[in-house]
Image (cartoon, grey):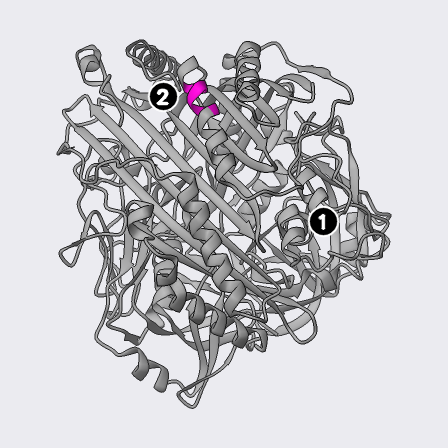
Amino acid sequence: MNNVAQYALEKALKAGVNKVSVQVSNGRKDEFNIEANNFSLMRTLFEDELTLKVITNNRKGTMSINKLDKDSVDGAVEECIAMAKASAPDEAEDIAPLVKNENFSRTIGGADKQKLFSRTQEFIQELKDKYPTVSTDMQTEFNHTKAIYLNSNGVEFNDEAEWYYAQPMFSAKEGEASSSFNYYAVAADNLDKPFMDLGMLRTLIAESERSVKTRMVDDKFVGKIILTPACDDMIWYTLLWNFLDTSSMISGTSRWKDALSTLVADKKLTFSSSPLNPDMIVGERFTSDGFLSQDFDYIKDGMLNSYALNLYGANKTGKPRAANSALYNIEVAAGDTSLSEMIKGVDKGILINRFSGASPGPSGDISGVAKNSFLIENGKVTDAVSETMLSFNVVDILQNIPAISKERCVNGITVLPWFMFDGITISGK
Amino acid sequence: MLRDFLSSHKGAFKDYTELRAQINTNQRAVLVSGNMVANSQDSEGGVSARVYRGGTFGFASSATYTPEGVKNVLSAAADNAIFMDSQVKKGKPPLPDTISGNKGLVISPGLAVPQSYLIDFIQAIDAMIVKKFRNLSSRTVVANILNMEKQLVVSDGANSHFYQPRSMVYVVMTADTSDGVPVELYRPLGRLGHFNEIFTDPNLLERELDTLYESLMKKRDGIFPKAGLNKVILGPKMAGMLAHEAIGHTVEADAVLNGSVASFNLNKQVASELVSMVDYAHTYNGEPCPLPVYVDDEGIAAEDAILIKDGILTGYMHNRDTARQLNAKPQGNARAFTFSDEPLIRMRNTAIVPGVSKLEDMIASVDDGYYLVSSGNGQADQTGEFTFSVEEGYEIKNGKIGRALRETSVSGVAFDMLKTIDMVSDDMHWDISGFCGKKQPMTCGMGGPAMRCDINLGGK
């Protein structure tokens, strides 16, 4: 693998390009699949990948192939150079300088296929025994990857990692009534605990059973919602894709494009990217640009501290580069209110486990339906809701966050508390 | 073009076996406000085998597509099937033989389109936008080619070679409202075919750019709709989303086995009698469908799946296994996205069948409501509850189109909402621009006419 990376790098340089980076990886995935609570398939993937980036006269080309033989690599290098030559010149294109080379190893002794099967079987059996109305499709996996990154500035990183992963998609059914489906992913570096005990999985499955019978909100009101850690895409990924990432900053559509070091949210909010946090299983160790990854805060005590800019985006906009490119390892600092106190503080609102909504535009206006969610009435969680639509602007609701929970949920991918937001338009049919 | 290293291994099949070689190539060039933010190519190819034994499958894949590589994945898939059979012990009989598909190439892989062609094309589009339209705060132009080639042999006789090039240009325009809030509209353009044969001249897209800009200028001054239940004309571009997301996913047999709303509604009235819906395999009205499928990845000869006929739910979409479980005929819906993906039940070209009304009469019939033109994305679940974004929409007042709408979304429960449809237009609009997500992505066609209905709108 190292030889392939070195060969591709040298071939591109000999062809006369100015800057090159190469990442070569191989891996293996072993996966069990469940359909409607029954084992359906075992899948084994043998994976190879070479990703090449060349810059010549400030023109960039990127090529990715999944073959590592000499002919394929030769073809990829030649095509990538041709692509770069056809591109438009841009002085912002660059690769990382050499600072410090490192090797990372996060192996866990290889796949325990029999134990992975047993944990999967145990999960299904527990569903049948304790949650008999719940049916799930599911995949459970063992993953092994080995990667090397080289660039023409002398940067070299090696990383080998192994981890387990499970993602059930489930719903409950009684007669002709059923809950909405829900899904949840967990990652782990061992199989010591049952999957059911990871993250919010048990809670969500139990709540699925409670969501078979639903109530419609019969009016329209502006009220509070409590967002659980399972509903991570409604706010946090919306902020990343629309206000913080390279594309929204270069296009100028980010509403926060000039907001660095200003208050953009309630001072209770600290929102971070934390791939090095030990709770994040197999967090990123080096960026796709060739920098060592570090944890950082997007928002610190309500103030915008960093965008999610890659090297090109940083050079293009003149703003600082983000300290990692792991957009998925998000963390939000705990608050000072217990979840039970938060719920007691809502006269009429909704506890949101999943939000099915349209992708928001750059305005931050969002509307969609509350799924696997419950009414909160007079400080108590009551009935599950259906056909209940939420409308709000994500920039506006961040300005006043009434409470963030003391408790946080760890699922191997994110570390998030529960949040209370106010000013949400909630409408029934 | 893929060489055939598969056929010679057919003699080694012991249990039901699929052997598939596949290569997906993806070319992409992206200009954001004139900056070339992406100029990339991906090529992902290899071979996979799936073996059925006793009620479960074993699957394996490798990027090494050589005679030796084929042998290795067959062996690994068989090992996985044996492991599963020994652990799970379902004791089911072999999958029954069925009507096998045998089909050679319908479209031949052409010469690769040079990346420079994509770059030149989008630079010309971008220059046209800059020259013509003054009130934009941002623009994005994307060229994308996805070529998919598959060879398949199956133990019960199927043998197919398939090639599908999808060529797209996406244009996004953004403008700021008077209070500085950015709003955007996008337009996907493209179809099945080679990029340089579809997009021959950037100037031919000028009219599309004009209408996109005009619509955005209206949206910039748009209003939010009234939240709640409203009388709505869903335009033809929205109907495909409805057919795919809100209805189509509930009638996939794996969802049915998980208890979807369709599981207890077979042969029942689920929609107004004006509504019929079909998952077309490869031909619509005597013409090739937007993304035709002749043989699926289980080797089944593909045929149309009639899902709703005159408002009655008449059938589901199947793979071989669910067809046996539910005593139905598989019709070619098992498809895999990459060589390393197993076939899943997927839609092909799913559409509401056009009716007889005229769109202009339908709009004129609404005193107070909305005309929803296009959607960006949508989601639904097995209860049939759905949400779609509304990218472009207008209010209707006294039968006339009024002010444009800002971003909003619609929601409802499919089998309730479908019963409120009381007019169906004679239009038909197909869309192939997106990807369906279900463990794997997949290209799908979706289509339909305009429909008058009652639907829940987000808003203020």
Residue mark closest to the camera, 2 vs 1: 1
Say which residue appears at 60% left-offset and 35% top-offset.
Answer: A57
**Does A429 appear above or below A112?**
below
Residue that carries the numbered disc 1 in the rendered image = A317
Point out residue A381 in the picture as x, y percentages from the top left corner: 68, 56
**Does A384 appear above or below A86?**
below
**Does B443 appear above or below A194?**
below
- In which quadrant is the N terminus of chain B drawn? top left
Q: How far is disc 2 from disc 1 in space, using C-alphas?
A: 47 Å
Say which residue appears at 74% left-offset and 40% top-offset.
Answer: A321
Horizontal side of B429 relative to A31 (left or right) equals: left
Name the disc covering residue B59, or none.
Answer: 2
Nearer to the camera, B153 or A287: A287
Magenta stretch bounds: A72-77
Nearer to the camera, A178 or B38: B38
Name the disc covering residue B109, or none.
Answer: none
Point out residue A36 in the picture as x, y percentages from the top left corner: 40, 36
Residue type, numbered disc 1: Thr
Q: Write down the chain letter for disc 1.
A: A
Contact, CB < 8 Å: mark 2 with mark 1? no
